[in-house]
Amino acid sequence: MPTKSTMQRLRIIAAGCLALLASVGGGTAAERGVAGLPYAEGKTFTTLDAYLAHLKALAPIGVPHYEEVAPGTYERQLQRVLPGQKRPRLTRAELERELGFSR
C-alpha cells in the first residue's frame, strides 16, 4: 500500500500532466496562439495585431502585409499591383476568421 507522501506526489504529478495536456490542445487562439500562418517564420501569434505587426516588419523585403485604411478595414499591400487590379480589402472580423484568430 502506498504511503501518504507517495500518494501526494502522485497527485502533484497527475495535476501537472493534466495541466500540460490542457496547454497543448484546446483553448482559444489567445491562449494557444495561431501557428502555420503565411510568412510567420515558425512563430506562433496570440493576437491578430501581433501577426500584422510581424508582417509589416517584413514588408521592406517584399512580404505582403495589411494596412488599416479605415477603422476596422484592412487592405492587403502587395509589392506589385497591375493596372486595373484592386488591392484586397477585408474587415477585421474577416481577417480574424480567415487567419484563425478568435475574439
Image (tube, helix red, strand yellow):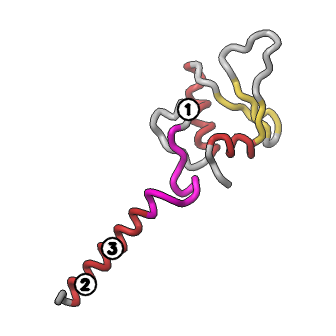
| Residue highlighted by disc 3 | 14
Res. 5 mark:
none
Q: Residues within 10 Å of mark 3 (few under 14, many from 20)?
A: few
Which comes before the other along the chain, label 2 or label 1? 2
CA distance separating discs 2 and 1: 47 Å
| 10 up-or-down from 35: above or below | below
Judge whether residue 29 is colored magenta. yes
Q: Which mark is residue 7?
A: 2
Q: Nearer the viewer, residue 91 or 2?
A: 2
Q: Please state the horizontal and vertical placement of residue 100, each as a whole percent of the image.
A: 62, 45
| Horizontal arrangement in the rendering, residue 92 relative to residue 100 (left or right) | right
CA gap between label 3 and label 1 equals: 37 Å
Query: Pointer 1: what residue?
Result: 38
Task: Check if residue 50 falls in the magenta segment.
Answer: no
Q: Which three-letter amino acid code belongs to the residue tagged 1?
A: Pro
Is 100 placed left or right of 72 in the picture? left
Rounded to the nearest whole Å, what is the CA distance between mark 3 and mark 2?
A: 10 Å
State the image quarter where residue 38 is shown: top right
Q: Residue at x 33, y 73 (%)?
A: 14
Nearer the N terminus, badge 3 or badge 2?
2
| Kind of residue at disc 3 | Ala
* Residue 74 percent location from the top left of the image: 75, 35
Q: Residue at x 27, y 83 (%)?
A: 8
Residue range highlighted in magenta: 22-36
Position of residue 25 relative to residue 37, above or below, is: below
Contact? badges 3 and 1 (CB < 8 Å): no
Q: Quadrant of the C terminus?
A: bottom right
What amino acid is labelled 2 in the image? Met
Secondary structure at numbered mark 1: loop
Q: Where residue 12 appears, x then y in whole percent?
A: 31, 76
Provide residue 29's location: percent of width, then percent of height: 57, 53
Classed neighbour count for the residue bearing mark 1: other residues with Cα under 10 Å, few (<14), some (14–19), many (≥20) = few
